[in-house]
Amino acid sequence: MTYSQTMPAEDDLASGQGRSWRSTLSADSAAAAEAKLHKLGYQWQWQQDGSLHVMTPVLPAVRELADGSRSFFNQLIAAFFGWQDARNDGSKAICFGDGTAIDADAMATAIRLAEALTVDLHWQQGDVALIDNLRVMHGRRAFTGERRVLASLVA
């Protein structure tokens, strides 16, 4: 699979994927951004408004983990739903490795399966969840009220 998106020049809090290229790439200049993208094997194109359009190299949708098990490890659904704004169309953000678009029926199947396999955590004060990010998709549903999340990433 390949993913493409356009990152704004400045953070855009009105967008689900609104981090600027500076924030996303931890880069303070176009040259530093290009160096990181080159190292990652991305293709890129600067836009006239200062935003940056990027495309990943071909990434596997299924990865083999250290114990030999396999994981459907990708951003397929997040990209489809979350990369919607004035610069991005989630339905066009993901392609197969050969560049062909993933059709709507295939996306609908992936979304239906993810929903069927979803387990909601019914949080109570003091709860802690440990999630293996290589094995489990994670996300959140719409909610009301205050939200406070503390996260730690461990390799």
Image (cartoon, grey):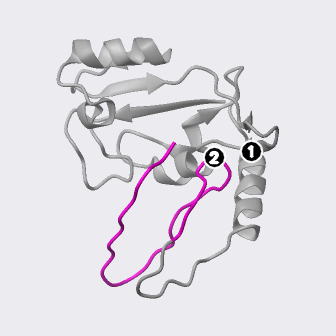
What x and y, as percent, mark residue 120?
A: 61, 77
Which residue shows up at 63% across the image and 46% down it?
A: 134
Q: Quadrant of residue 53?
A: top left
Quadrant hosting residue 88: top left
Residue 125, image x and y in percent?
Answer: 41, 87
How many dots with numbers?
A: 2
Boundaries of the magenta span? 129-155
Residue 71's tag is 1
Callout 2: SS: loop
As drawn, 69 above or below 128 = above
Q: Secondary structure at mark 1?
A: strand
Query: Label 2 amino acid?
Result: Leu
Figure quadrant of the N terminus: top right
Magenta residue check for 149: yes
Amino acid on which the number 1 mark rests in the picture: Ser
Measured from the top left, where is residue 55 in percent x and y?
Answer: 50, 24
Q: Is residue 115 left or right of residue 51?
A: right
Tell me which label, 2 or 1, sits earlier in the chain: 1
Q: Which residue is mark 2?
A: 134
Question: Cβ–Cβ below 8 Å for labels 2 and 1?
Answer: yes
The answer to whether 80 appears left or right of 68 in the picture is left
Between residue 124 and residue 97, name the one nearer to us.
Answer: 124
